[in-house]
Image (spheres, rainbow, N blue to C red):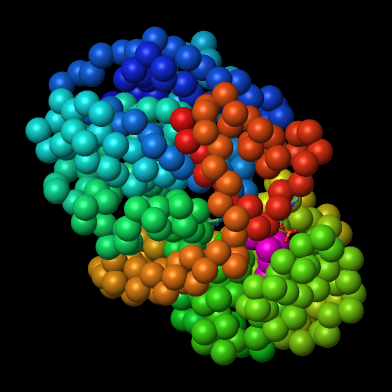
Amino acid sequence: MIRRSLLTLSRSSHATFCVTKNNLSASSLLKPPAPTLEENEISLSITSAAFTANNMTYAHAGGPPLNYWHFFPPPNPQLRSLGVIPVWGFGTVSESRSPDVKEGDTYYGFYPMASDYQTLPIKANPHSFTVARSDPALAAVYNTYLNTNTDPFYQSPSLEQPMMIFRPLFLTSFFLDDFLALNGLFGAQRVLLTSASSKTSFALAYMLKRRGVEVLGLTSEGNKKFCEKLGLFSSVVGYDEIDTLDAVDTVVVDMAGSHAVNVALDKVLGQKLVRNIGVGMTHNTVVGGDRSELSEHAVATREFFFAPAWIKKRIGEDRDIVNVAAAEAYAKFVGKSEELRWLDYQVTEGTEKWADVYNVFAGVGGKKVQPSDAHILKP
Ligand SMILES: NC(=O)c1ccc[n+]([C@@H]2O[C@H](COP(=O)([O-])OP(=O)(O)OC[C@H]3O[C@@H](n4cnc5c(N)ncnc54)[C@H](OP(=O)(O)O)[C@@H]3O)[C@@H](O)[C@H]2O)c1
């Protein structure tokens, strides 16, 4: 049975962080009264979640075609101008009216940016439960919540922070690497990553480097040192130095989604740009729309990579690709990130303080996103 996704309360201190859909600079905290659970419903207390540029992109892609606003629509139709940003994190079952989901168990998954999540599992077993969204067209990969007792990615409580930050990003990088490998790098000699300092980019650089692929990183002047310190790129180039690149066959993997950067790459690479794979929009510019100033070749060689769609296809070909191959690669990668050379984990506790983190990514208040920061939100 498909039900509306209830973003409601299971305790009096419940709070939901909302943003104004048509003005992402504005955020607010909703504190509606606690509802009671209906039969088979469960309520989870969200214990912690990560916030990176990826979550900001969910807000930018809140409307069609990706419709991230449809995951957690506010319960009250009068609040439809507000959007709730999805975050990856952990929730512990605080109350259950489902015979298949036990109170006290903890699940990793896709949560609203809130203190609690009330939902109706439509399928459950000891390892996971699955929910139906109000919009059935949303990618299914977001609908399953994994019990930490049996999840192959869950290693220990001490690795929960890297898991929240990296699991969705690393999986994207793992499958981008898979996509590039299966396509023989489109015949290119090297891969160039924009927003090289982003976690998705440097996780991809890590995967490509393991296979001996030459990877160039393109980043802001201020983030060059961070990228160099990672030791994952064969060279790091600033956005203002794009005209110094050699024109050799190159696949661009574009995390920044900046039209200006793509125009500059088109100018210097010309026909040597063999493929431009659009992945993200860290620079908060909407990709796909603006094609002015790009050559016909640049437009023809651009494609969008949507990790959930590629993962679905690959699971159809190899059922174990996520739980075995990706889980093994993830464990090795997170082992490295745990050296704490790469990131500083910053924990922000209290829903009323979440706006401080959000504002940095939304460009409110003049603070810059620091690539070494890994933000964890706790209610
Ligand atoms: N297509 C898919 O399926 C898929 C899946 C996962 C992730 N993604 C996308 O991959 C991108 C990277 O996500 P992430 O979570 O890895 O990012 P992140 O680590 O939080 O990225 C931080 C970096 O992004 C750039 N940046 C961030 N905010 C900015 C701002 N307000 N203005 C200018 N630059 C900003 C800066 O890099 P530079 O200085 O190096 O530019 C910064 O160091 C996101 O757009 C995400 O949505 C896509």
**Residue 175 belongs to the span the image colors magenta:** no
Is residue 292 in view?
A: yes
Question: In this image, 133 relative to 209: left or right?
Answer: left
Looking at the image, residue 377 lies above or below residue 261? above
Instruction: Name the spot of residue 104 as percent of width and height, x first.
Output: 21, 36
Question: In this image, 204 relative to 294: left or right?
Answer: left
Pick the residue in front: 345 or 53. Answer: 345
Looking at the image, residue 274 lies above or below residue 44? below
Looking at the image, residue 43 lies above or below residue 188? above
- Locate ligand 1 by image quadrant: bottom right
Pick the residue in front: 280 or 1. Answer: 280
Residue most extreme to the left: 99
Is residue 279 in view?
A: no
Looking at the image, residue 110 lies above or below residue 120? below
Residue appearing at x 15%, y 21% in the figure: 39
Residue appearing at x 29%, y 72% in the figure: 324
Question: In this image, 144 relative to 286: left or right?
Answer: left
- Which range is magenta? 191-198
Instruction: Name the spot of residue 81 as percent of width and height, x first.
Output: 58, 20
Instruction: Name the spot of residue 80 as percent of width and height, x first.
Output: 53, 19
**Residue 197 belongs to the span the image colors magenta:** yes
Question: In this image, 190 relative to 245: left or right?
Answer: left
Pick the residue in front: 3 or 223. Answer: 223
Instruction: Name the spot of residue 122 as percent of width and height, x first.
Output: 20, 37
The quadrant in which residue 2 appears is top left
Residue appearing at x 29%, y 37% in the figure: 92
Residue appearing at x 56%, y 37% in the figure: 348
Q: Quadrant of the N terminus?
A: top left
> Looking at the magenta stretch, what is its main secondary structure?
loop
The quadrant in which residue 96 appears is top left
